């Protein structure tokens, strides 16, 4: 009997080893390749969808992929359906799958990284449970109309670009972003709602019609808006940020950041021709330069105590006085180059370029040094260091 038991024990071990070996890397060229792993609840390697695959791909029974799911240039792939898959350890990478129309991952909650590029036929996601964990997310050049099913709590890089049909993004669960959050080149009426985002690193927005971040408290890096179509920006809880830029937002009438007290870098507001006033009542410290130019009539910087870089404030219709700022320059509260003009026909930013969209070209600006300026037209991470370094030249 003991010999028989030993034989069956050895057979069982051999079967387990065989099963384990058969649940590693797999290349799928046809549905039969996918069917061959249907007995595996977990795959310990990568799933590569070959570029020759054609039609709908169904991955049954697999609950976990410790590696990546990859499809590159699978131009005849029309859908991927994985009803039981809960997690992908590394990358979910789909590139140049031009006929892909459906991603059905009903139970998927965790992904190491999402990277989707050149998926023009993909219009929606069937992620019923919702992906709540992902490291970085890059979605570019797709046909997606929304990101329903991406329900992240935290994210590293979140880059959503060149999706011309993307109309609305609401990621209700997102609380923290540790790398670049970037929206650009999507539908120009894109609405973005990030109601619970409290902390972030760099955030840049282009070509959007609205953005809501009522819980945002702290930005470690840049907050920038270029060429947007929203009328008002409201960040009621934001207390600090690095570089802050509002440039060429032609419908912007109001900026409200009542608790903002510190900008660790440069602060640029320029070429926002419908902006009626700049009111930052809690702002105390700017470690770079202040560069405000446009057609606004009101300025409230009543708590300002220090500007380590330059100071440029110019408007066509200013009803404010430069007297307080003159005194701040005299007492070296403003340490860089200084210019304040409440009323001027051609307001310029600190590098001599027009501060309004109604006047073009460079305007000479006697006494204004580039040492305290920033390039409002060129968004870049790390402008804080640039502002600080240039301020030392003054």
Image (spheres, rainbow, N blue to C red):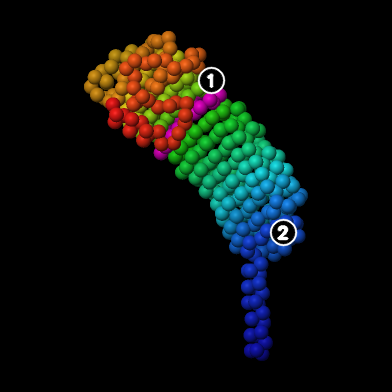
Apparent side of residue 293 relative to residue 151 in the rendered image (left or right) = left
Rendering coords of residue 310 (x, y %): 33, 24
Rendering coords of residue 80 (x, y %): 70, 50
Rendering coords of residue 293 (x, y %): 42, 18
For this rendering, which residue is in front, 256 or 136? Answer: 136
Q: Are marks 2 and 1 in contact (CB under 8 Å)?
A: no
Q: Which quadrant would the N terminus be assigned to in this image?
A: bottom right
For residue 185, above or below residue 298? below
Residue in the image at 47% along x and 16% along y: 361
Tell me the element at label 2: helix
| Residue 97, visible in the rendered structure | yes
Examine the image and state in which quarter residue 270 appears.
top left
**Residue at image mark 2:** 34
Count of all numbered marks drawn on residues in the image = 2
Apparent side of residue 142 relative to residue 206 in the rendered image (left or right) = right
For residue 48, above or below residue 312? below
Q: Which quadrant would the C terminus be assigned to in this image?
A: top left
| Residue 298, visible in the rendered structure | no
Q: Nearer the viewer, mark 2 or mark 1?
A: 2
Q: Which residues are magenta?
A: 220-239
Q: Mark 2 or mark 1: which comes first in sequence?
A: 2
Residue in the image at 45% along x and 39% along y: 200
Rendering coords of residue 186 (x, y %): 60, 32
Judged by its main secondary structure, the magenta piece is loop
Apparent side of residue 335 relative to residue 177 in the rendered image (left or right) = left
**Residue at image mark 1:** 251
Examine the image and state in which quarter residue 90 appears.
bottom right
Residue in the image at 37% along x and 16% along y: 365
For this rendering, which residue is in front, 1 or 299? Answer: 299
Tell me the element at label 1: loop
Q: Residues within 10 Å of mark 1 (few under 14, many from 20)?
A: some
């Amino acid at each position: 009997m003991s010999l028989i038991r030993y034989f069956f024990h050895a057979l069982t071990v051999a079967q387990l080893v065989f099963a384990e070996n058969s649940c590693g890397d797999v290349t799928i060229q046809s549905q039969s390749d996918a069917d061959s792993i249907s007995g595996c609840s977990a795959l310990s390697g990568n799933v590569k969808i070959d570029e020759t695959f054609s039609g709908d791909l169904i991955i049954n029974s697999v609950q976990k992929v410790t590696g990546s799911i990859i499809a590159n240039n699978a131009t005849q792939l029309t859908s991927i359906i994985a009803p039981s898959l809960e997690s992908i350890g590394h990358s979910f990478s789909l590139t140049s799958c031009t006929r892909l129309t459906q991603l059905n991952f009903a139970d998927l909650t965790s992904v190491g990284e999402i990277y989707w590029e050149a998926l023009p036929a993909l219009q929606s996601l069937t992620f019923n449970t919702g992906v709540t964990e992902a490291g970085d997310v890059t979605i570019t050049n797709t046909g997606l109309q929304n990101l329903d099913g991406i329900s992240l709590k935290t994210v590293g890089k979140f880059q959503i670009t060149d999706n011309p049909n993307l109309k609305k993004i609401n990621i209700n669960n997102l609380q923290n972003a540790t790398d670049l959050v970037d929206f650009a080149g999507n539908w120009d009426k894109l609405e973005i709602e990030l109601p619970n985002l409290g902390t972030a690193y760099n955030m840049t927005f282009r070509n959007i019609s609205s953005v809501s971040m009522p819980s945002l408290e702290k930005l470690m890096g840049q907050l920038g808006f270029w060429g947007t179509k929203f009328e008002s920006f409201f960040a009621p809880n934001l207390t600090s940020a690095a570089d802050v830029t509002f440039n060429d937002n032609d419908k912007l009438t109001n900026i409200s950041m009542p608790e903002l007290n510190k900008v660790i870098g440069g602060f640029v507001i320029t070429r926002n021709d419908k902006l009626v006033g700049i009111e930052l009542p809690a702002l105390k410290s700017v470690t770079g330069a202040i560069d405000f130019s446009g057609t606004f009539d009101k300025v409230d910087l009543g708590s300002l105590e220090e500007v380590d870089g330059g100071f440029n404030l110019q408007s066509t219709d200013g009803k404010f006085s430069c007297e307080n700022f003159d005194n701040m320059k005299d007492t070296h509260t403003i340490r860089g180059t200084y210019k304040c003009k409440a009323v001027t026909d051609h307001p310029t930013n600190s590098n001599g370029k027009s501060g309004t969209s109604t006047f073009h070209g460079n305007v000479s600006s006697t006494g204004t040094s580039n040492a305290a300026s920033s390039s409002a037209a060129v968004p870049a991470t790390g402008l804080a260091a640039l502002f600080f370094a240039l301020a030392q030249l003054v």
